[in-house]
Image (tube, grey):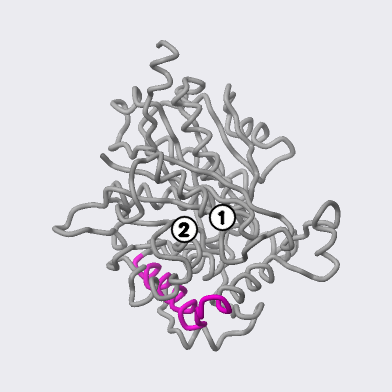
Amino acid sequence: MSPAAHRARKVAVVGVSLSDCGRVDTATPYALHAQAARRALADSGLDRSVVDGFASAGLGTLAPVEVAEYLGLRPTWTDSTAVGGSTWEVMAAHAADAIAAGHARAVLLVYGSTARADIRAGRRTANLSFGARGPLQFEVPYGHTLVAKYAMAARRHMHEYGTTLEQLADIAVQARINAGHNPDAMFREPITVDDVLSGPMIADPFTKLHCCIRSDGGCAVLLAAEEYVPDTAKAPVWVLGSGTAVSHTTMSEWEDFTISPAAASGRAAFARAGVRPSDIDVAQLYDAFTYMTLVTLEDLGFCAKGEGGAFAAKGRLTRDGELPTNTDGGGLSACHPGMRGLFLLVEAVRQLRGEAGERQVHKAGGRLPELAVASGTGGWFCSAGTVVLGRG
């Protein structure tokens, strides 16, 4: 195949899977990686010999080399990008570019974590320690935790635009409604706005139910060049466009607490895909906290800046709403094993394939969704990666 043909190659997601998720007390993170990888390969119908690219982060001394060795892979293209929760959308963008350019045939993205089990067993603490070197040394002594950074941003949005606690709480309520249709979600019992508001305070204005759950689990996504699509077991989901962006690490260097780097990554992804936010049928957005969903909706262009609270109201984000969002229940109710970005891609693909079971979104006339967006956020709005996927 000529270099020109390589550059013209389209790229599809051909396999997705979750490992065991939720409460997994006996597996190691490596085992969850392996389980997810095997299931994604089986889902694709392709032989593992096709896979010549591998991407992983967060595990091993030489990730992804160590994880690839555990899986018995010897890739000739690798990526170990580590930018927090958006890592997997950024990796997907890198992988799609590499495949389109002919640098790889098929790239496997894998993640696995036993964050919940490790805390229960005393192998790690619940609070992340970022150390006191570099720029962060000026914030660490004051106990400026990750949740506090998000809480400060939420409070600023409330001050600037009149966003209310009830609007933020309603996002958690809708995530739980979606989780109620997902048999694999950790928490499925309905909650109310009052339940969210009356919960124990974690970091003002966030009570417990404004914050993501902690779980174990892993997942995998396999991307491949278009010439392998005829050999796959299921219909392809095409990578139509992607965008990445970074913002800050220290809060003092963040110019506007109400704008996330998704404003840049989303604009690039939609432009490259040749679609508009209004064309999107389902959205999978990183939701470690309710405010993340709200501000990402704004920054991706689903509504104007400052209108996220009103936009997300009245059930618009539920399975049957105008913009079904985090249809598996998201990090607020379904699962959140440390980094959740790859789970967003899995759920987006399942929705486009029509494989989401009780939580499946149907558009007018009972048709399946045609377009989905997955947008991950890393750190405390430090990074963003956005991927637009389509069936057509």
Task: Give the image quarter of residue 261.
Answer: bottom right
- Could you tell me which residue is drawn at 21 percent across and 58 percent down? 363
Residue closest to the far left = 365
Pointer 2: what residue?
Answer: 285
The overriding secondary structure of the stretch rendered in magenta is: helix
Q: Amino acid at mark 1?
A: Thr
The reply to whether the C-beta atoms of the residues labelled 1 and 2 are less than 8 Å apart is: yes
Question: What quarter of the picture does the C terminus occupy?
Answer: top left
Q: CA distance from mark 1 to mark 2?
A: 8 Å
- Horizontal side of 266 relative to 128 (left or right) equals left
- Could you tell me which residue is drawn at 35 percent across and 24 percent down? 228
Chain-order first, disc 1 or disc 2: 2
Q: Looking at the picture, tell me which residue is in the foreground, 246 or 162.
A: 162
- Is 314 inside the magenta-drawn segment? no
The mark found on residue 377 in the picture is 1
Where is residue 294? Give x, y as percent: 48, 68
Where is residue 153? Give x, y as percent: 62, 70
Residue closest to the far top = 2
Q: Secondary structure at mark 2?
A: strand
Residue 389 lies, with reference to residue 367, above or below; the image says above
Q: Looking at the picture, tell me which residue is in the foreground, 77 or 116.
A: 77
Question: What quarter of the picture does the N terminus occupy?
Answer: top left
Residue segment shown in magenta: 158-181
Residue 343 lies, with reference to residue 319, above or below; the image says above
Q: Amino acid at mark 2?
A: Leu
Q: Secondary structure at mark 1?
A: strand
Where is residue 283? Give x, y as percent: 39, 57
